[in-house]
Amino acid sequence: MGEGTAGNIILTGFSYTGKTKVGQEVARRLGWSFVDIDEEIVRLWGKPIAEIFARDGESRFRELEREVLQRVCQEKEAVVSTGGGAIMNASNRELMMAGGVVICLEAKPATIYQRLLRDAEASDEQEVRPLLAGSDPLRRIEWLKGFRQPYYALSDWTVHTDNLTLEEAAEEVIRGWRYGGGKKRERIVLPSMADARESDAPYCEQQGAACVVTTATESYPVFVGWGFLDQLGKRMRNAGLQGRAHIVSDDRVFPLYGDRVKKILEEAGFAVDSMAVPQGERSKSFETAVSIYDWLVDRRAERGDSIVALGGGVVGDLAGFVAATFLRGLPLVQIPTSLVGMVDSAIGGKVGINHPEGKNLIGAFYQPRLVLADIQTLTTLLRRELVSGWAEVIKHAMIRDPRLLKLLEERSQELLKLEEQVTTEVVARSAAIKAGVVSEDEKELGIRIILNYGHTIAHGLEAATSYERFLHGEAVAIGMMGAAMISQQLGLLSQEVVQRQQALLQRFDLPTRCSDVDIERILRAMELDKKTGEEKVHWVLLAGVGQPVIRDDVPREVAVGVIRELLQS
């Protein structure tokens, strides 16, 4: 394939490597058209990209990105500038590789950092740019760039722009187009995280992570393994964190792991202090949050400091809420020590506190810098707490992964005994499901709502009993049975699947019924729950294993009837 026959020139690369300016110069020299994918999306849909993310969700943006890319790649003699994350998707990579010569513009992290600083200083915008947030932006750029590097490396040609003028960089791109057009190498298409979930490919293991959450403004790893706690200091350093680490824990977990975590962080060069709140759901309150604010003020916490949430879901939600709101945001590190935390609450950025009238009514979306789950810490959980956590794993299997469901059924006894290999595999798989859904929809504007399977009734049960009777997973297990029964009554789900779910929950010693709860209090709490919109409860139901559906037309009498049945022990 010689000059002029290689279709298009498609530019990829990290932010501030020069894709737009260099692409425009290349197009001018060749007499071709220039297309910036992000600008084309804005032009066609009449909204800034930030608004598309905020109002329609990242999954919608990715759909639009793919639509534009598919159309543009069918053109000839176009220089196409793609967003820095577009190449992470396997379908996009196939389109790019088929549409022309893929050329990566590279630059060292220090170069990117200096360019970003100059651009921010020259801009009138007041908002702090995400890449400049935190105490060590350069380390953060190194870290984020490292995640994408294996994908950038699949390009046909690479141009290092650090010391090149605009004209020199354009000339190198044209040279790469001429050379690459005639020597198109075999295409290697790495699976995206969502693709990997549906295939036999391993989950994303970039930098040793079990999976990676990638949203519009963040990309962070989730580390899952036996004995991983000792890696905490190194992992935080690699994430660009430094300064003081403020550990927030509870009065049960801190005596078990607090001193060890403090020592690990101090050996990594962090100054460390700590605070333990009373264990239990009652600590997810405004009063407890204020006590942590007071403690941080007393310690003169600064924006470069980090909040380290050491504990279960309550600690993660509470400490995350404080991190999101104190000084307009401190870096957050999640160290879940409960199964619920490892596979669910520590991943995805939902943080919050409770209100007497409902669970998690006050909160925010605030992503952590990293999540580190040491499976070995589960061995110190009370049996009831461990059992409660399996409800979230079963939920993930029911809504997303039939193979995980079968694994849970076949090896339930080994999992209840926390046998190292299978437990690590299952927790990593469940965490990757949560990470994949969050990456598609960070702010619950679309697919993320499926993670609320069982939670509508569960949150009603918890609020109706003042968060004292049920552990979260216990309530979710009962709520899942209610959702499955409603699904069956609406003709969506077979009795066989309902019974299969019930049998698995019981195999893990989880409740499927309860008694002595005021149904009116349950219903009132459900109507206040965050999944309510336009005075309708949005139910997550099932049409089969791995087939969640969202319905807002469930007759009230059906829901009430099912809840009454659940209350008959």
Image (cartoon, rainbow, N blue to C red):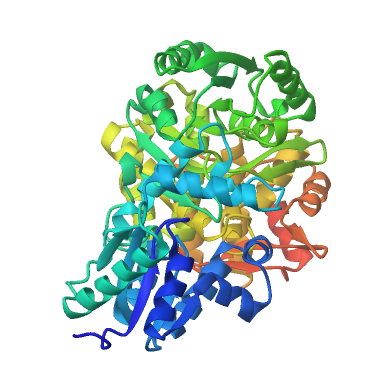
Towards the viewer: 125 or 230: 125
| Residue 196, percent from left and from top | 33, 59
Give the residue at x 67% y 62%: 539
Q: Residue 103 appears at what percent x and percent y? A: 32, 68
Q: State whether residue 423 is above or below residue 42.
A: above
Place residue 186 in its image quadrant. bottom left
Above/below status of 30 relative to 126: below
Quarter the N terminus occupies? bottom left
Is 23 on the left-hand or right-hand side of 40? left
In the rendered structure, the answer to whether residue 50 lies left or right of residue 417 reads right
Q: Quadrant of residue 511?
A: top right
Q: Is residue 428 above or below residue 501?
A: above
Q: Would residue 219 be visible to someone looking at this image?
A: no
Relative to the observer, which residue lies in front, 475 or 513? 475
Percent position (x, y) of residue 154?
A: 26, 63
Taking depth in this image into account, of 379 and 494 the one nearest to the observer is 379
Q: 27 and 554: which one is in front?
A: 27
Residue at (42, 42) in percent of width and height: 110
The quadrant in which the C terminus is found is top right
Q: Residue at x 35, y 52 (%)?
A: 163
Q: Please tell me which residue is depicted at 72% across the width and 68% down the height of the picture.
A: 552
Task: Tell me if I can see residue 338 in this picture.
Answer: yes
